[in-house]
Amino acid sequence: MEKLQKNLSPIPVKTWNWLGVNDTVLEADIPAITDYSKQPVTTGSEKGVTITDIRLSRDTIKFMEKKMDTGASEAMRDFVKKNQNSGYFIEIEEGEKIGTPIFLQYDLDEENPTLVDDHFILAHENSEATIIINYKSSCIQNGFHSGVTKVFAKKGAVVHLIKVQMLADQDTHVDAISAIADEKGQVDFTLIELGALQTITGCRTQLVGKNSTGTIHSLYFGDQNRKIDINYVQTHQARESLSSIEARGVLLDHSQKVFKGTLDFIKGSSGSKGKEEEYTVLLSPTVRNRSTPLMLCGEDAVEGQHAVSTGKMDENKLFYLMSRGLSEAEAKKLIIEAEFQPILEKIPVSELRDTISMYLRRRLNRV
Amino acid sequence: MDKKKTVVEDIDRGLYDIKNEDRYRYKASKGLTPQIVLDISKEKNDPEWMREFRLRSLEIYNQTSMPTWGPSLHELDMDDIVTYVRPDTEMKGKWQEVPDDIKDTFERLGIPQAERESLAGVGAQYDSEVVYHSVKEELVKQGVVYTDMESALREYEPMIKEYFMKLVTPNDHKFVALHGAVWSGGSFVYVPPGVQVEIPLQSYFRLNSPGAGQFEHTLIIVDKGAKLHFIEGCSAPKYNVTNLHAGCVELYIKEDASLRYSTIENWSRNMLNLNTKRALVEKNGSIEWVSGSFGSKISMLYPRSILKGEGARAEFNGVTFAAQGQVLDTGAAVIHAAPYTSSNINSRSISKGGGVAVYRGAVKVAPNAHHCKSLVSCESLMLDDLSRSDTLPVIDIQNDEVDIGHEARIGRIREEAIFYLMSRGISEQEAKAMIVRGFAEPIAKELPLEYAVEMNNLINIELEGTIG
């Protein structure tokens, strides 16, 4: 167990140790992993979709798994394999466009305080689906979640994966996503990190096929003593691949955040374009906000750009709203909600969107 | 038909590669032992505290591990490095008295001509010792001190003891500990309160001896309200053995004072350049770095500014040109340690022929440093797909009253820009040349004097076909 607690989410290229961003340490103790007895799949069986227990599908996915780089440490991959207590192999048939999102709901409670989930989403050629995985917890102390989700979008396939994390204040959340997009394939992630005391999360996309696309829209909210560690990597391995990372967040109270975002242009990825943007609003003098936007380039005929901007809330906007009769707190809430809205809009299920908005509003009341 | 790629010539190193006969008065044995450190100390007639400092630094060096990040330094074998070479001459105050071959080398590098034309003082270091030093009389009258470090250690011992390696301590990293143990040569500058030195001072470091290291120490104190422009240049001929440069620069900028520190690192392609530079800036003071990294096999060079006083400012303008066989890992770090401080980092890199250019940077804002501003801008131009260009910046902010921005861009020349210039009657070739020159221009225009020659070599590229 000791091994899992260090070097959990390394950046692709190390920098000065004194900055403390090279890797991540899990601060909580890892509890004994017990069964997760609930049924998380809440959708009906759609035509063109097969959802099976991943343990029964190991042989099918073994070959594809080998190609995938989770970005998480070896220790974490071993940990998930060894301790897995839930997980599904979700297969979308060739040419099928699944209209209704596939929904997995995980809810930690006193009887199921630990979750180690392992998922594999395989979208066959020219298929399309949206998968939503929601993590929350009710009435428990020190819940623990650790998981790996792998996504394989074959030629022309499109996978939208939405992960929402609203765990309780004392919980621990360690999550890694790895994805491969084949020719003209698209992997599109919306990742929302709102809860847990410590969040360590990563997403690594390998654009292996010509004209493949990888996008990440990310939202985070830190308050109280929360610690958030985010590590996204978009690797351009093929020609004319496209990637983007857009992250927005707010930090309050004593919260801390490390954002690591990498665009990696491998030699041979000519004609590729990558873009990364991070915008953080700081709302307390005791927050700590670290950003590490890396750009690695071994190919000349590419376009890459990244931008990070951090600071106080736009005072002109605040002034304008307050001149219209809103209190400072209300004005701030409105601005933050407006910032988050474009990313929340990406969630196609209105009930979930509303739940997140309510959850955020409650937390923003502390602003 | 394949698109023709741009050909960018290597910098002609011609005059830098001229070697002199390896004549010396004293040369330490290869390697690094307490006895070698004691021998250097004895040779230099160190005071007791300095001898102890050297031995303590050696202990730290032995206890410190190699960096776990950055370029591989596996080629570095300290058992093969000579840490001290005293050239076969004493330090001269008159140019005519410098031995002919050494004088010729510096003449070729343009040092005395620059001194005559536009410098207020010059120091010239050959291998481990400063061989020539002069400073204009009117500055001496104003109380400006510009001398070599050894003389400073004798003549200004209390001040040296107060400041020497207090800003960059031997505990910082392995190669600074090494520097603390075997340092020799370098410059000491003190500008008294309120004195404005309008004409630059310059030190030039030349390493001639094969397989040797150069560990010069530069200590500059610009006192309250004073102003200085200091220029440093370095070069070495190419040998087939690895040379090591682990210099250390400590700059103290007091209240309302300002320092501009310009340097071109143009070492030969067998050199490992592991230099450490740091500035401590007090209230309303300012440090301005102008930095060009061209030569060396491997460079690890990141000037750090510590903005300690309210309203202190730092500016960094750097250009890096990495060609075949080079890994130039360069950048800048700024620590905002006081309120109302500001910094501006502007870094450009060009890589070609398999060269690797890395920007490594950090902006750190301490909890008490409210109302500070920082803007970091990195741009990279890669001229072929053999080369690499990586950008590794880190921003660490510990309060909410800040305004911090970072942007980086990599890519080839845009067709629209060429089209626009051509539509104004400029030929395609010239349009491309203009764009590349324009890319390096913001830094090139800040470079002084004879270094413009080096920069011109960089800008004067031969264009054929398109970039990229």
Image (spheres, coloured by chain):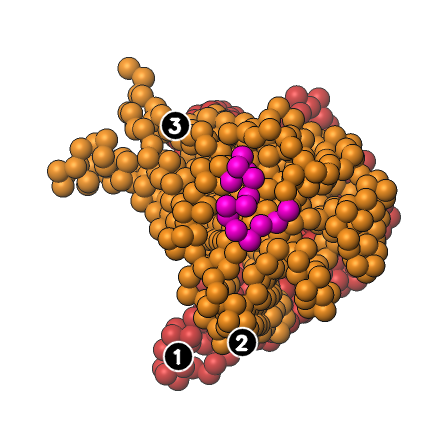
Chain colours: A red, B orange
Residue bearing the label numbered 3: B9
Give whichever of discs 2 and 3 has the lower sequence position: 3
Chain to which mark 2 belongs:
B
- Alpha carbon of mark 2 to alpha carbon of mark 1: how far? 45 Å
The label shown at residue B193 is 2
Q: Which residue was labeled with disc 1?
A: A319
- Of the residues shown, which amino acid type is indicated by label 3? Glu
Kind of residue sitting beneath label 1: Phe
The residue carrying pointer 1 sits among few (fewer than 14), some (14 to 19) or many (20 or more) residues within 10 Å by Cα, namely: few
Relative to A271, residue B135 above or below: below
Q: What kind of element bears circle 2? A: loop
The secondary structure type at the circle numbered 1 is helix
Instruction: State the quadrant of the N terminus of chain B.
Output: top left
Mark 2 burial class by Cα count in 10 Å: few <14, some 14-19, many 20+:
some
Q: Which label was assigned to residue B281? A: none
Q: Which residues are magenta?
A: B90-103
